[in-house]
């Protein structure tokens, strides 16, 4: 009886050990098919994104040809902008479900890295000769709070002043228009005030969400001598001359009747009304918005406008008083990263390098993060593509720390309060300061 008990106990131990190995996965066998054969390398991305899917499928074919025994699995995560980050994090939390490569919004990259979801790639990238061809400011978007690199950019974007050449010329303003200060922008808007329905369009409502922060507030703020976050002190700047001047600029736009009608200007549909309705009707003089605007007017766009190239041009937003670097913009974009719990990290990095090489990195109509690609005739066939890409030389990135969504929400509150006239710029900045100190703690804030 005792011998049988010992044998039974031994069998139970073996079964438990075997089950533990299966449950934990273990990196040695992870990624292999059930028969122990070919490895599977999984990449996830936010769907729908036809341009990404078309591009990454071509990379997949090339990678599989170069790596016999490796199957690349492309998984489309069907989710909207708000759901994708949550679904992605849930997958990355477990060794069982973690993909090998994730498509990361640069807004989420720093928080994801700080939370331990992403693998540092610094050594791999610094030893990669191609890394020298990426725009330096764009590299900031994939740099974590710890200074490590957590991905390779696949696309980026910028913001600038889209203006109607016909409207400005009719008001006696020379084109191409090259404003050198904020006053130049407001003066031009004033000159065309009686000629169009919207002399100067800016996102400034709470309903526009991040559009108000990123298309309007931050490009203006970064054109002052102030900042939103002090990297050295690791504190949010809640009171500064630049913050106040940015709110005053927004206040001037609406106080002087240069903006859109408040009956719809702060609604969630305002941006679409501007780009697909009023701009094609030539009822907008100047619009501070992103490089994606012309996508609305192409043959397959939301509002085809064959004459748009004759009517519209683009100028960079100047700094407040023309101080260095002379212009200001803000960038976001996407990157490919490797989860910390990925089973095939080395293979994943090889795939990302292949995808982002000079020969392969073509991702729809978005701006390239590579300087060498920006010089290609093929890339510059799109109207204003070269001009927009040149904005990357002076771009800035959001301080996307864990608290950033709350900070951004408070910025939107301040911008809308000034837009509607419910607060003065001074009152709105005071309200912003109090809200941020309540959200992140007064010890994590400072006055500039």
Image (tube, grey):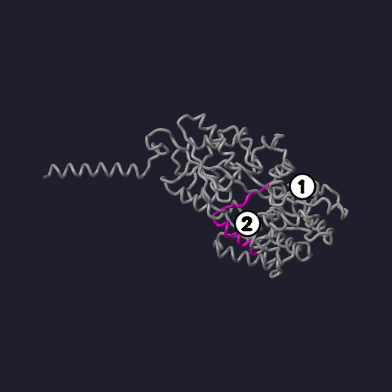
Which of the pair 85/370 is nearer the observer? 85
Residue at 86%, 49% in the rendered image: 174
In the picture, measured across the screen, residue 175 lies left or right of residue 42, that is right
Q: Position of residue 222 (x, y in %)?
A: 69, 53
Q: Which mark is residue 55?
A: none
Residue at 59%, 59% in the rendered image: 407
Dot 2 corresponds to which residue?
210
Query: Crowding at label 1, few (<14), some or many (≥20) Cα neighbours within 10 Å?
Result: few
Q: Position of residue 142 (x, y in %)?
A: 58, 44
In the picture, measured across the screen, residue 183 lies left or right of residue 140, that is right
Residue at 73%, 61% in the rendered image: 250
Q: Position of residue 57 (x, y in %)?
A: 55, 38
Inspect this view and state whether residue 149 appears.
no
Q: Which mark is residue 306?
A: 1
Badge 2 marks a residue whose secondary structure is: helix
Rendered view: 386 above or below 184: above
In the picture, residue 287 is in which quadrant? bottom right
Query: Crowding at label 2, few (<14), some or many (≥20) Cα neighbours within 10 Å?
Result: some
Q: In the rendered structure, which disc, 1 or 2, sits on the residue that comes first in sequence?
A: 2
Which of the pair 94/280 is nearer the observer? 280
Which of the pair 236/408 is nearer the observer? 408
Label 1 to label 2: alpha-carbon separation? 30 Å
Inspect this view and state whether residue 19 appears.
yes
> Dividing the image into 4 quarters, which one contains the N terminus?
top left
In the picture, measured across the screen, residue 325 lies left or right of residue 66, that is right
The answer to whether residue 409 is magenta is yes
Q: Of the residues tagged 1 and 2, which is closer to the observer?
A: 1
> Dividing the image into 4 quarters, which one contains the C terminus?
bottom right
Badge 1 marks a residue whose secondary structure is: loop
In the picture, residue 358 is in which quadrant? top right
Per the rendered image, the range of residues in magenta is 395-413
- Identity of the residue furthest to the bottom in this view: 422
């Amino acid at each position: 009886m005792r011998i049988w008990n010992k044998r039974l106990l031994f069998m139970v131990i073996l079964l438990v050990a075997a089950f533990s190995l299966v449950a934990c996965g273990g990196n040695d066998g992870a990624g292999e098919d059930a028969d122990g054969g070919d490895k599977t390398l999984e990449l996830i991305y936010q769907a729908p994104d036809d341009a990404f899917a078309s591009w990454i499928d071509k990379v997949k074919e090339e990678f599989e040809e170069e790596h016999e025994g490796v199957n690349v699995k492309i998984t489309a995560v069907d989710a909207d902008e708000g759901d994708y980050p949550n679904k992605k994090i849930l997958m990355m939390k477990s060794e069982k479900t973690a993909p090998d490569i994730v498509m990361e919004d640069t807004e989420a990259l720093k928080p994801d890295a700080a939370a331990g979801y992403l693998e540092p790639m610094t050594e791999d990238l610094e030893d990669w000769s191609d890394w020298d061809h990426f725009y330096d400011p764009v590299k900031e978007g994939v740099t974590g709070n710890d200074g490590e690199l957590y991905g390779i950019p696949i696309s980026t974007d910028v913001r600038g002043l889209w203006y109607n050449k016909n409207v400005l010329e009719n008001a006696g303003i020379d084109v191409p228009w090259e404003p050198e200060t904020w006053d130049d922008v407001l003066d031009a808007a004033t000159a065309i005030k009686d000629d169009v329905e919207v002399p100067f369009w800016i996102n400034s409502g709470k309903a526009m969400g991040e559009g108000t922060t990123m298309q309007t507030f931050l490009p203006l703020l970064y054109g002052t001598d102030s900042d939103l976050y002090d990297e050295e002190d690791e504190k949010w700047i809640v009171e500064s001359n630049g913050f106040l001047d940015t709110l005053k600029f927004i206040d001037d736009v609406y106080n002087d009747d240069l903006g859109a009608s408040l009956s719809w200007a702060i609604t969630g549909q305002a941006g679409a009304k501007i780009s697909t309705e009023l701009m094609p009707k030539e009822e907008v003089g100047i619009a501070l918005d992103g490089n994606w605007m012309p996508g609305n007017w192409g043959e397959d766009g939301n509002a085809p406008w064959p004459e748009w190239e004759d009517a519209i041009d683009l100028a960079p937003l100047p700094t407040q008083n023309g101080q260095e670097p002379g212009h200001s913009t803000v960038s976001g974009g996407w990157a490919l990263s490797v989860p910390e719990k990925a089973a095939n990290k080395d293979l994943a990095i090889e795939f990302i390098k292949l995808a982002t090489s000079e020969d392969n990195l073509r991702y729809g109509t978005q701006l390239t993060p590579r300087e060498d690609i920006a010089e290609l005739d093929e890339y510059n066939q799109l109207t204003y593509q070269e001009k927009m890409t040149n904005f990357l030389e002076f771009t800035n990135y959001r301080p996307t720390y864990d608290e950033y969504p709350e900070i951004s929400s408070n910025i939107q509150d301040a911008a809308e309060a000034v837009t509607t006239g419910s607060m003065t710029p001074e009152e709105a900045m005071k309200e912003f300061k109090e809200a941020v100190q309540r959200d992140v703690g007064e010890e994590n804030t400072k006055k500039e």
